[in-house]
Amino acid sequence: MSYGTAVEIGSPRDTLQYVRRTMIPWLQWDLVADSVAKRLAAARPDLRGPGLQAPALAAALASLKESAVAPLGQVLAPAQTDEIGAYLRAQPGFAGHHMTSSDGRERPYADIVAEGGRYVAYRPETVVKAPHAMALANRPEILDLVEAALGCPPTLYSVSAWWSFPVAGEPWPPHSQHFHRDDDDFRFFTLFVYLTDVDSEFDGPNQIVPGSHTLAGMNALIADAATAGRLVPDQAMVNNLLTQWPQPTTLVENAFAPRIVSTLGPRGTGFFADTRTLHRGFQPRERVRGILWFRFGLGPNSNSSDVDLVDGPVPVAAVGSAIPDTPRHRYVNRLLVRWD
């Protein structure tokens, strides 16, 4: 039985990315996403979940759509995050916030720290094999929430984990710790989980500008900043704020400072985000911050982790935590996990 999408069976991912970036403004992506999601949902109704049964999930969905972030509370116990952290520190990594933003040399965590590195990041298969990680990403409430947000059965296309260190100076590479928008797919959502306590801005929290994922929201933010005297907008500036990449970090900080929201919480805190919105991981000032991400979208894309898997999808027996063997779970995890 095939679980593939059009992209998987012939449409080059880079072509799709090119079309998205050059021909369709990101503020119109939802129109395309609605059409794609409707087709995917109709093609495989047997993969659909039961919907949002709990009021808390409905509230999370409303928050995600309105503000681009949905707090989930503590989704992993401290002991579980400590176990994940100990596992990761024992694995080789890369001196970047992602393996592709590093120098490409995989080496021990301790060596990168000794070199004064800003980050340690890992191969996707390392994350797939981490304890507790994939079980969390496949919890029914997680899949039900992201399915409701997408409008179709989700595809888990990217996993990542990295440490950020309190190193002085400007961040490099800058992308993760400067305000930016992600552009992986026409519609996608990221589940973040803190592996360390993030009690204040000194600990490097995720920060977003709520509402900046929509044109109406951006217009409201710009109007509010102009009224308060934090911004004297001209057309070039407005266009810059509405572009996909890069973002003028200093301008965002000055104009939208009162609107920036930091997600704080003890290790194990999870939250969903629509990272088309203006967001960043704030540069930690006092102690290391660890974080996991799981990205769900409409299907594979040019930022999918499967293209970075050295030996292809990880055999299910090697996954670090149990995943139910159902048609839904096989579909969701098909890019990263191999059952046969």
Image (tube, helix red, strand yellow):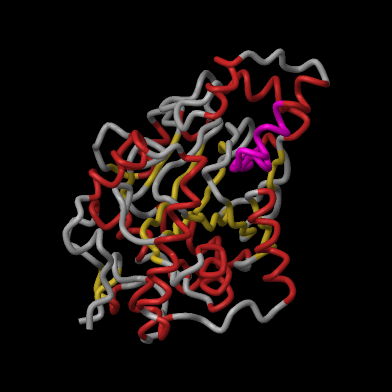
x and y percentages locating residue 137 in the rendered image: 48, 68
Give the residue at the far right of this rendering.
Answer: 228
What residue is rendered at 23% in x and 78% in y?
2
Residue 190 vs residue 298, the one in the foreground: 298
What residue is rendered at 41% in x and 55% in y?
88
Q: Quadrant of the N terminus?
A: bottom left
The answer to whether residue 71 is above or below residue 283 is: below
What residue is rendered at 31% in x and 43% in y?
17
User: Dividing the picture into quarters, in which one does residue 19 lie?
Assistant: top left
The answer to whether residue 103 shows anywhere in this view is yes
Q: Is residue 274 left or right of residue 4?
A: right
The answer to whether residue 113 is above or below residue 172 is: below
Bounds of the magenta span?
Answer: 203-222
In magenta segment, residue 62: no
The answer to whether residue 139 is above or below residue 308 is: below
x and y percentages locating residue 208 in the rendered image: 64, 40
The answer to whether residue 294 is above or below residue 77 is: above
x and y percentages locating residue 103 in the rendered image: 27, 31
Q: Quadrant of the C terminus?
A: bottom left
Q: Is residue 234 left or right of residue 320?
A: right
